[in-house]
Amino acid sequence: MPLSCKIHAARDLRFEQQADAELGPHQVEVQLGAAGICGSDLHYYFHGRAGAFQIREPLTPGHEASGAVLRTGSAVKGLSPGTKVAINPSQACGSCGYCRKGRENLCTQMRFLGSASIFPHVQGMFRDRFVVNERQLTAVGTDITFGELAFAEPLAVALHSVNRCGPLLGKTVLVTGAGTIGCLIVMAARVAGAARIIACDVAEHPLQAASASGADMLVRSDASGNPGLSDSADICLEAAGNVKALAACIDACRRGGRIVQVGTLPADGVHFPANAVMARELEYVGAFRFGIEFDWAVDYLVSRRIDARPLLTAQLPLKDAAAAFDLAADKSRSTKVQLVGEAAMA
């Protein structure tokens, strides 16, 4: 029988058999192609929570995935068995005030795959097969690999983050944190017209990934003698989820500039230098998930206007999920680690 990866508590990962699912008229059963391990997945596995979202029942993580259609509901059109698909993990209600304003990422009734944000939890895609609504699927008719297509979700996050920056043409951009999201932000900022991109991290492997992504300048922030970043950037994006990285953004942002917080900071709060924001008229905004940017991400990947392949470190079978989590957590060796299903190995 198909298997599902379940996290019961911190470092308590188990595999459970899946029963065959019944399909509603507009539902589709998808076979896993590839699914990336995200920072939030690591937090669920190692800590039993991601930010304010705590596991309260066994959770199947995984929200950045691709796959192949297995079965379709009676009313589904345009999808047939074997079709390769990108999967949008967002299930916005479409009727709340935020959805009607085109800000569905802020939907008050959002159901996001692989998240413990609501209870019962919304189960994710680290499993052999899963059922989603047809509107969450984008069919792809090219030879793009499952691994590349699974970057659609994190690239959508990066594109939304860059969208929150405002115009970037000719600007100098600082990105703190050169993990997958940080590197994809580098790529997205370049597409948006940034003139100079600085990537900052505390480790060498992420910085090399940022270089491969197109960063113009690399800063090892924990090294003695690193070049000062004060007053160096028009736009700063905090993608590390680190208090010191946020402080670096505030210090580096030029007067009248903008800081975009992308990373998830500690749930117990941070010391925030609000007077610097006031006196230098800095704009401080958040970037949370994505909306229409998911469609853009698929287009960019299929056309290879953005090429995420240099960020893919390894692919492991679903049954080796524990080893994959350990590898993904080791930033000295990995950028993006994916779990792959039978569709990708066929």
Image (cartoon, rainbow, N blue to C red):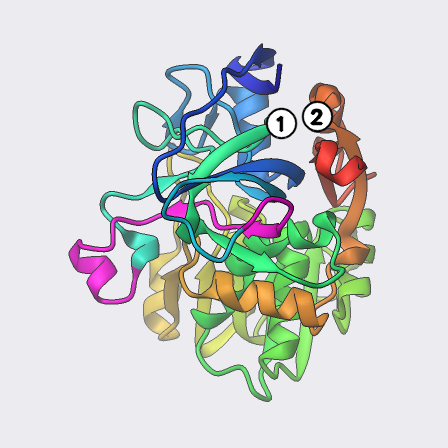
Furthest toward the front, the residue is 74
Nearer-the-camera pick, 91 or 59: 91
Q: Is residue 70 above or below residue 168?
A: above
Q: Is residue 229 visible?
A: no
Q: Is residue 8 above or below residue 251?
A: above
For label 1, the residue is 128
Q: Which residues are magenta?
A: 80-103
The quarter of the image holding the C terminus is: top right
Secondary structure at numbered mark 2: helix
The location of residue 108, given as percent across then percent down, is 22, 46
The location of residue 50, given as percent across then percent down, is 46, 31
Indicate which disc, 1 or 2, sits on the residue closer to the N terminus.
1
The residue lying at 82 percent from left, 63 percent from top is 212
Q: CA distance from mark 1 to mark 2?
A: 8 Å
Residue 313 appears left or right of 60: right
- Discs 1, 2 touching: Cβ within 8 Å: yes
The location of residue 73, given as percent across then percent down, is 41, 40
Query: In terms of image quadrants, where is residue 194?
Result: bottom right
Nearer-the-camera pick, 149 or 103: 149
Q: Residues within 10 Å of mark 1 (few under 14, many from 20)?
A: many
The residue lying at 63 percent from left, 44 percent from top is 68
How many labels, in total? 2
For label 2, the residue is 318
The location of residue 13, given as percent across then percent down, is 60, 14
Give the amino acid at mark 2: Leu
Q: Residue 177: within the magenta?
A: no
Q: Residue 86: within the magenta?
A: yes
Secondary structure at numbered mark 1: loop
